[in-house]
Image (cartoon, rainbow, N blue to C red):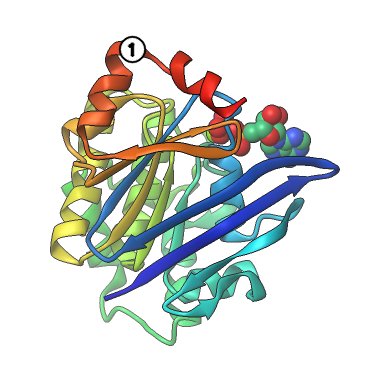
């Protein structure tokens, strides 16, 4: 059982405070959705958890099984079991997926006896063209291909806690279904814990949230069960934007 505990997290970019005290605990097998309007601070939360340069934690803590995540460089956070699926996946010219994954496994003191076979099996599982696996990571991929590629990395590396920053942005319905289903399977098969950032509840058709949190103006203004996502779909965010003022 793994626990990611975010306590009273305050984050600034430059002189601007973006997150004003986020408290959230995610355990193995749980899916926590974080929903909120543009500019609420959702990507800032994911950046702070992974240690993206430029995002300064001014107070609060992030603990992974009691270990101080904020004291670790990004690569150690990944080795410790945190994994970010980026809103806008990075293109990496000249580097193949198998090389990325093999290095990542080595950093974990791990290896897969037949990595290429595993990659191909996982690619097939999410309908990702196995030809693309042999090209440079994400270079000239479509939006859907990039997110399938990111999901494949998650499936092979089997992190303890995954942060999905708008998995649903830039992909078509088929890709969304395949990627969301794969993550849902990981929460059941490998007890993956997931922090799922999104605007839209359509992602939840395949990836079922246990908890839904509404983030507005850098604060969690309401938490509830899946019914909260339905309420947002119906009524929008306007009511919560007021609460956060
Ligand atoms: P969301 O993902 O919820 O749409 P973000 O976390 O990306 O929101 O952004 C929250 C606020 O922080 C926005 O006002 C955005 O302009 C600001 N912000 C985020 N990252 C940066 C950055 N690197 N430099 C300047 N402002 C930033
Ligand atoms: Mg964002």
Residue 103 seen in render: no
Q: Residue 200: percent from the left, percent from the top?
A: 34, 24
**Quadrant of the image for the C terminus?**
top right
The image quadrant of residue 235 is top left
Residue 188 seen in render: yes
> Few, some or many C-alpha atoms within 10 Å of disc 1 (few <14, some 14-19, many ≥20)?
few
Q: Residue 149: percent from the left, percent from the top?
A: 38, 46
SS at circle 1 = helix
The image quadrant of residue 146 is top left
Q: Residue 177: percent from the left, percent from the top?
A: 21, 33
The image quadrant of residue 65 is bottom left
- Residue in the foreground of this view, choosing between 243 and 27: 243
Residue at horizontal 22 percent and vertical 61 percent from the top: 29
Residue at horizontal 16 percent and vertical 53 percent from the top: 185
Residue at horizontal 21 percent and vertical 38 percent from the top: 178
Q: Is residue 222 above or below residue 50?
A: above
- Residue in the foreground of this view, choosing between 125 and 231: 231
Q: Residue furthest bottom?
A: 109
- Residue in the foreground of this view, choosing between 6 and 46: 6
Q: Which residue is mark 1?
A: 235
Residue at horizontal 41 percent and vertical 63 percent from the top: 98
Left or right placement of residue 161 versus residue 202 in this view: right
Q: Quadrant of ligand 1?
A: top right
- Residue in the foreground of this view, choosing between 19 and 171: 19
Left or right placement of residue 178 versus residue 218 in this view: left
**Disc 1 within 8 angstroms of ligand 1 (CB):** no
Left or right placement of residue 237 versus residue 1 in this view: right
């Amino acid at each position: 059982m793994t626990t990611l505990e975010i306590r009273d997290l305050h984050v600034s970019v430059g002189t601007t405070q973006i997150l004003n005290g986020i408290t959230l605990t995610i355990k193995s097998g749980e899916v926590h959705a974080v929903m909120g309007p543009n500019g609420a601070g959702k990507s800032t939360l994911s950046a702070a958890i992974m240690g993206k340069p430029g995002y300064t934690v001014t107070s609060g803590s992030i603990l992974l099984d009691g270990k101080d995540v904020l004291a670790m460089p990004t690569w150690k956070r990944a080795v410790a079991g945190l994994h970010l699926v980026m809103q806008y996946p990075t293109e990496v010219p000249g580097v193949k997926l198998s090389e990325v994954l093999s290095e990542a496994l080595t950093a974990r003191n791990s290896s897969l006896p037949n990595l290429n076979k595993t990659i191909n099996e996982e690619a097939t599982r999410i309908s990702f063209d196995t030809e693309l696996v042999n090209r440079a990571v994400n270079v000239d991929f479509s939006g859907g291909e990039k997110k399938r590629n990111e999901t494949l990395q998650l499936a092979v590396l089997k992190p303890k806690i995954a942060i999905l920053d708008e998995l649903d942005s830039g992909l078509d319905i088929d890709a969304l279904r395949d990627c969301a289903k794969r993550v849902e399977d990981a929460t059941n098969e490998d007890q993956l814990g997931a922090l799922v950032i999104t605007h839209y509840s359509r992602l939840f058709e395949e990836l079922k949230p246990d908890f839904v949190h509404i983030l507005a103006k850098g604060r969690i203004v309401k938490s509830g069960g899946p019914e909260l996502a339905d309420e947002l779909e119906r009524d929008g965010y306007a009511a919560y934007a007021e609460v956060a003022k």
